[in-house]
Amino acid sequence: MPDSSATGLHAEAHDPALLHHFAEPQQQRDAASLGMWVFLATEVMFFGGLFLAYLVYRLKYFGDFGAASKTLDVRLGATNTAVLICSSLTVVLAVWAAQTARRTLLIGSLGLTMILGLVFLGIKGVEYNDKFVEHHVPGASFSFEKVPIPGHPRQYSDPRHAQLFFSLYFVMTGLHALHMIIGLGIFLWLLTMAWKGRFTPEWHTPVEIGGLYWHFVDIIWIYLFPLLYLIDRHP
Amino acid sequence: MSEHSKSSPLPTYFVVFLALLVGTALTVYASGLDLARFNAAVALTIASIKATLVALFFMHIKGASEKLTKLVVIGALFFLLLLLGLTMTDYATRLWS
Amino acid sequence: MPTPMPQPDGRENYLNKHYGVWSWLLTTDHKRIALLYLISITFFFFIGGFFALLIRLELLTPAGDLVQADTYNKLFSMHGIVMIFFFLVPSIPAVLGNFLVPLMIGAKDLAFPRINLLSWYLYIIGGALMVHCMLTGGVDTGWTFYAPFSTNFSNTKVVEAGIAVFIAGFSSILTGLNFVVTIHRMRAPGMTWSRLPLFIWAHYATSIIQLLGTPVLAITLTLVAAERALHLGIFDPKLGGDPILFQHLFWFYSHPAVYIMILPAMGVVTEIIACFSRKRIFGYSFVAFSSIAIAVFGFLVWAHHMFVAGTSVYAALVFSLLSYAVAVPSAIKVFNWTATLYKGSIHYDAPMLYAFGFLGLFTIGGLTGLFLAALGIDVHVTDTYFVVAHFHYIMVGGAVMGYLGGMHFWWPKISGKLYPEGWARLAALIVFIGFNLTFFPQFLLGYLGMPRRYYDYSHMPEFQVLNVLSTAGATVLGVGYLLPMIYFLWSMRYGKPASDNPWNAAGLEWQTASPPTTFNFEQEPVVTWEAYNYDELDAPHNDAPHSEEVPVAR
């Protein structure tokens, strides 16, 4: 809520970054922050539908999902998790750099975040290629060999349900990767602005809310990794 | 959001960062143990702790005076759980009759 | 308080401040964006109405003799998709909400004006894609896109329609986001939550639903498109998938969506009833919190659309019970409106006629919803015209009447002109008669067993009479809808100029010019009074004319 003493149309010292329909910079910052958090809430529900599908089918076809999950490379998945965690660190460093007017650190952190994002996507690409080569991409050429289900002698995993797993795998990680790509676009824009020296300790809102988006994408992966890669890994 | 305590937040960031990496390693290790139905619970618990750390410390909920932000986050999680939980009233009871 | 009759248009306002197509297409003024939406949704209303006309023409005779079966499937599908996603969902929020939310809270604009413009462009892009889809083959899955027909068997442009709806949905999400942030952060000094007009509470509740529900529709349509285009079979029974999972995901949005469509209309009706009873709304807190309750409870009941789909009967029991609960906050509103009318000083201007129509028709629609919530009855009447009548009573008898009432009420503010009151009352009456003639027979048809989505009922020729009545009603209704379009346009050129507050209504929007300037207020308002202060507005010590002599066109 704006200060009740502000009855004029413009703030006294007119901050060039202050948009005309706001009474003061703090109101503008609070609006931007609330806007991004509300948007992230919508993203929770967007991914939520996929988590529902995953929940329903995993409970129904646990053995088959386990067998399918085992064909994913845990080392690559864990590496990617670590990559994203590092990138979240570089993001908070970027925000701190903007707050404390450290331009070089800001540019470096933003750039490093982008590099880590590209590493993530690169590893993802390798994984997708592996799946393509193994014929685990759902569709006409899908093929999954029946493996015995541990603890259930004479029962074999059902390739049809494995195809369900991989459908979910590709949609969930694909959607996540799409959000990463959008995030890279956002950070490229932030990097450009930082390079031009547009961020100050008084105004660096885009860095903060861009950071919020990036952390959210990280959190989604924090859940995707155990759910997709670690269903049934014990001997 | 531009006001922070006088001391540097950097040590906190690095501690959280290490905790996140440890959590990841722990998740992978725990998945190799045979905990039957608790494997999933352990994995999701660790994931939730990691997510909470990111949200509280990296996304600056902790220390933010904004009750509204917390309300938004809790609201989103509530509706997600609603989606999952109420749908499961169908799937969990399909075989009852 | 009512201002003296104004001089003819000389003042600068948001309409005449800038001229030229680009000043409109690149505007960030919420009022201009509201008008952009007004034109667009009217266009889609015509398209949806055109499909309705063809449906009703086909049903004049029992035989399927106007169109082929596949064509008929496309007709009702596109009627539903266009009317729901491209007319009803945006209607009040994007037109009246966009225009009034900043004015009512004393702000200069919404929190994110450029995102507001983006919302409109997304709507237009989604709409253009939908028009292209309709012109190049259409879609025949029903607006409900059920799998596995939509994913595996339909030969129509399902993916394109899905993408169009997805994009329009994103527009809806951004509008909701804008409203929530605006209402939290941009209220004028003194405008506390308990002084907000209930129109604002209604739009806040609507925005919550838009934000939390629409993304689930988005992911559902994405999965349908993925299954169709990329063979990523999530709902495919051949792979062990469950088509009912599609229904869970679809209805998780689509049930709250009906509250997106009705809550804003309830907000409009509240404002109108208060003004034309000259009374503060009875039970302000109850009405405010019932809006939030409807938004939350609305998310708990979706599977009542799936009682005969094959879910577990225990889940059906749970959802049936919850569906009874969701009727309570709506009923609370009806009681509060009624109590407001009691001993009020009632004025029968056109907006009030629409509000009265809303009260009766929404009540009927809501009560028949309770019939449907009962499992036993639902098994009998589901997928019949009973359901069709039920939701048209709410969506047309409720939401559209609310929209028309709101357009009339705020037309002087939006355009600076008065519409012709005599014609408006006539149109309201025609709409009411036409509506009931169209849809009441459908309750009977459904109860007697006529299935919905059938183009041929020649095995039940006794239904023809009721169908003919319904089609006749639809024609009358169409006339009723055309009249306001004509006289609103007429009034922009020839209507009497409106004063700042022709209704002597409460609310900050009436404290500024008609039409407002681009930045809404000369000075930022400071609010020191409660909402609906009609006792102050009508107090006799005012030297302004008494409320009965409020200057309106007759």
Image (tube, helix red, strand yellow):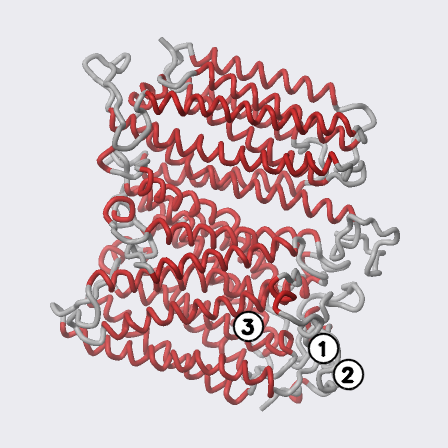
Number of disc labels: 3
Image location (x, y in percent) of residue C475? 34, 80
Looking at the rendered structure, the secondary structure element under dot 3 is helix
Label 2 and label 3: CA atoms lie apart by 27 Å
Q: To which residue does mark 1 refer?
A: C537
For marks 2 and 3, give the one nearer the viewer. 3
Looking at the image, which residue sits at the far bottom?
A: C554
Q: Are marks 1 and 2 in contact (CB under 8 Å)?
A: yes
Image location (x, y in percent) of residue A163? 29, 28
Answer with the quarter of the image where residue C44 lies: bottom left
Q: Nearer the viewer, residue C18 or C305?
A: C18
Left or right relative to C296: residue C501 = right
- The disc labelled 1 sits on which kind of residue? Leu
Q: Say the numbered circle drawn on residue C542.
A: 2
Looking at the image, which residue sits at the far right?
A: A12
Label 1 and label 3: CA atoms lie apart by 21 Å
